[in-house]
Image (cartoon, coloured by chain):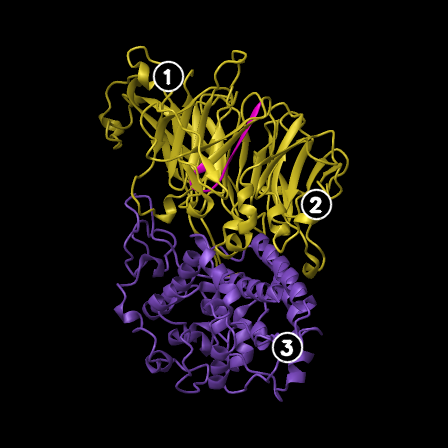
Chain colours: A purple, B yellow
Amino acid sequence: MEFKLEAHRIVSISLGKIYNSRVQRGGIKLHKNLLVSLVLRSARQVYLSDPCPGLYPWAGGFFFFPTGGPWRPPPQQQPGELAAGPPAGWGEPPRPPPTEPQSELSAVSEAPRVGDAVPAATVTGVGDVPQGGEADAAEAAWSRVEGPCQAAAGEAEGPAGGWAVFPLGSRAARRPCGCPLGGKDPPGTPAATPRSACCCAPRPAEDEPPAPPAVCPRKRGAAGVGGGPASCPAPSSTPLKKPRRNLEQPSSGGEDDDAEEMETGNVANLISIFGSSFSGLLRKSPGGGREEEEGGESGPEAAEPGQICCDKPVLRDMNPWSTAIVAF
Amino acid sequence: PIGAGGGGCPAGGNDFQWCFSQVKGAIDEDVAEADIISTVEFNYSGDLLATGDKGGRVVIFQREQENKSRPHSRGEYNVYSTFQSHEPEFDYLKSLEIEEKINKIRWLPQQNAAHFLLSTNDKTIKLWKISERDKRAEGYNLKDEDGRLRDPFRITALRVPILKPMDLMVEASPRRIFANAHTYHINSISVNSDHETYLSADDLRINLWHLEITDRSFNIVDIKPANMEELTEVITAAEFHPHQCNVFVYSSSKGTIRLCDMRSSALCDRHSKFFEEPEDPSSRSFFSEIISSISDVKFSHSGRYMMSRDYLSVKVWDLNMESRPLETHQVHEYLRSKLCSLYENDCIFDKFECCWNGSDSAIMTGSYNNFFRMFDRDTRRDVTLEASRESSKPRASLKPRKVCTGGKRKKDEISVDSLDFNKKILHTAWHPADSVIAVAATNNLYIFQDKIN
């Protein structure tokens, strides 16, 4: 039983890492993602092999992954259906995952959530986490996620494409507190709604200090110190230092490119682990995924800032990897 | 004794004592990410010490000559040159940002008055020339002292320009840029013993370059599978043999090391030797694969041995024995029970480096809490030391540290749960001849020397 819980937890953590890696500077790190996918596979095997009929954390939770758009359950959502998608063995969930976004979330809040210390067995683990990089890295990842939405407003010429890496398409991601959503906004809506509708979330980014340097996209070339037009404050006193660019682009690599793309085969592994019911997740180009789900939006740039997660203060307080779970 | 640089130590005498010598970098608690040191390397003579940081800068320190009038500053390293090696780039086609972080610096052997080094970020390698200028020509005919051109018709007499001394200026100029040869992230560069070629390695490929030629390189290792879904391992480090210019090794994320001979074929996908220690099945966990991933591999100066670093240990291999390592040294075995937490906070992915001393009698590697470890291969003794501001009084001896793994914590011991995992020592370097070490602790560079030195 403990093995199953532990494995479940590790799967959640691993998913969170893969998720975060998509928004890290410098592109997806193949080595790290490969290692994470190996852990994911081991944990999955343990999870499946541990005979423990009583506990089924909402199995659907494993399959959900913040992608370009909100997760839409396949039509005719039945328990059997769900099990049919992923490789056999995930088991029958005790109840069908709901189809409504709101009830998805309430199901989330009811289901044991690994990150939120509901199961006692995992609480200790949370407490034991040594101070380290993951929370900071995730927070930093999140803050970078926020940044471009502000920058996008002020600076139309971001690098083309790929702005919308923020795989937080799932509106659920904006509800880390677990509140049901106020409305069923179509994904394309520049959504101020989610934030304001949530009673639990602290006030959005208006409260924050003016865009941190991380927000500024940097102009290349002659800009020198001082960066781009957003007049980012130089974070360092060294004259040679320039504000760091905040363009989080995973290696999007379309299949059509002539030049070799930095493929991330690990995500292909995820396909085999989780089954193809998960389309959109594992496209090399996150923009591609969204286009499919959002029915041809004008482009990633149009990805509403409002859709981008939630506020820094909330995120800071959360376990980073539970955001991945919560996103469902 | 640990740290014996060249000569022996008195038999049965006291160990050499490592003492604080210098620390470079800001004292600020708030560390700017750009200032985090990402590589440290002595040059062949040890007179120059280069560091690279996440902001793409290179700082070179030079050792002061011994000076009788200032005996205490003997052997001190002072800033010699600072320059911006790499800038962040954006690949618009792939929508990829390329970090400016300096992953590795490698010096070239010195051939004239100038110094040359290779520095690399994830995608581009640059050859830098660092040269001194301490003279300036004056008395040109066609231009005056400010550089303005003189009217030729006004010139009534000719003179020969003369060289006048000036304040020493150290200039760094990029002489070669080796770009566009790596699809994945470069993790290693290594200069060949022929002093003409070098290799660069990314996750899946290793390329061979000629130092003079920037527009092409030879691919000598390619482990990319035809179907990326079948990817099971990546290259984590690579190095040329110190004497045999046809031999190099590369390590993998699966804990294996392959030695290749470039004479055998153009593409060295088939190794000549394969070094792997069979895994102990009793210690298997979710994280066995991660902790077996090799983060660094280094030949000994003699070329007879090599050393590999994985998450919990350092292994010394005899090149003539592939089946298992000669020695295994535990760096921080007490972390084995914490692997899940270390996975959560990403520390398990930290890539520690390792280094040999000049005589190959000792090895050093870093750990957490600003601890670093030294292992003496002759006496089989090891010591844990700390790089901290507290023990930073001039010539103060470093006190050995000890981590308490359970039970009663003795005085002066630190318990595993109190370790600061944000303070990690990933990069260390040992002077090629003397008992001087450089230890990078986040944004600070510590230099320690042994008392005798």
According to the picture, the residue beneath numbered tag 3 turns out to be A277
**In screen coordinates, is B3 left or right of B64?**
right
Instruction: Give the letter of the chain under mark 3.
Output: A
Q: Secondary structure at mark 2?
A: loop
Instruction: Give the letter of the chain under mark 1.
Output: B
Question: Which comes sooner in the sequence, label 2 or label 1?
Answer: 1
Amino acid of disc 3? Ser
Q: Are marks 3 and 1 in contact (CB under 8 Å)?
A: no
Please tell me how crowded label 3 is: few (under 14), some (14-19), or many (20+) other residues with Cα within 10 Å: some
According to the picture, the residue beneath numbered tag 2 turns out to be B279
Q: CA distance from mark 3 to mark 1?
A: 68 Å
The range drawn in magenta is B361-371
Q: Is residue B365 magenta?
A: yes
Vertical placement of residue B263 versus A30, above or below: above
Q: CA distance from mark 3 to mark 2?
A: 36 Å
Q: Secondary structure at mark 3?
A: helix
Q: Position of residue B15 (x, y in %)?
A: 48, 19
Mark 2 or 1: in front is 2
Amino acid of disc 1? Gln
The numbered dot on residue A213 is none
According to the picture, the residue beneath numbered tag 1 turns out to be B65
Residue B147 appears in which quarter of the rendering? top left
**In screen coordinates, is A180 left or right of B138?**
right
Q: Is residue B399 magenta?
A: no
Q: Closest to the observer: B269 or A35?
A: A35
Vertical placement of residue B328 versus B99, above or below: above
